[in-house]
Image (cartoon, rainbow, N blue to C red):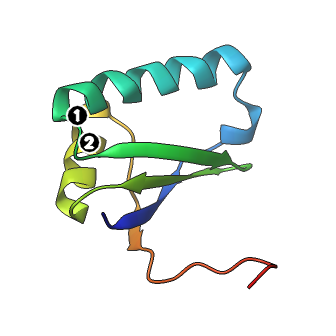
């Protein structure tokens, strides 16, 4: 299954409280459950003004649909072509 990195421009994301982040995660999961098992959220990284999310999905269009239905921006969707880490 293809893997994608989604860049979401969310001003002051880094200042969100734990409750805010959990609420956003719950909303995202509700939409994911409606879209079916083909799309999965792996994890996200919260920075000052962006959230970077890693998803698996058959295509970018399904990620765009998730963004529309959840209300979260998907400013840039990039398909992962390769992975590297310190052990390789």
Figure label count: 2
Q: Could you say where residue 86 lies in the image, as x and y percent from the top left?
A: 81, 79
Residue 55 higher or lower than 12, as above or below: below
Q: Could you say where residue 62 lies in the image, as x and y percent from the top left?
A: 20, 52
- Residue found 74% across the figure and 40% down from its top: 14
In three-dimensional space, the C-alpha distance between marks 2 and 1, rounded to whole angstroms, equals 5 Å
* Mark 2 vs 1: CB contact within 8 A: yes
- Residue found 52% across the figure and 17% down from its top: 23
Q: Secondary structure at mark 1?
A: helix
- The residue beneath circle 2 is 66
Residue 66 higher or lower than 24, as above or below: below
Residue 52 as seen in the image, left or right of residue 56? right
Q: Could you say where residue 43 lies in the image, as x and y percent from the top left?
A: 56, 45
Q: In the figure, residue 33 lies in which quadrant? A: top left
Q: In the figure, residue 2 lies in which quadrant? A: bottom left
Q: Taking the image as drawn, is residue 43 in sight?
A: yes
Q: In the figure, residue 35 lies in which quadrant? A: top left
- The residue beneath circle 1 is 69
Of residues 76 and 41, the one nearer the viewer is 41
């Amino acid at each position: 299954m293809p893997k994608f990195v989604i860049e979401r421009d969310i001003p002051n994301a880094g200042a969100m409280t734990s409750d805010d982040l959990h609420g956003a995660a719950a909303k995202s999961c509700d939409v994911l459950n409606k879209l079916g098992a083909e799309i999965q959220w792996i994890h996200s990284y919260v920075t000052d003004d962006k959230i970077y999310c890693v998803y698996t999905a058959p295509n970018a269009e399904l990620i765009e649909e998730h963004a529309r239905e959840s209300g979260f921006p998907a400013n840039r969707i990039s398909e992962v072509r390769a992975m590297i880490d310190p052990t390789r």
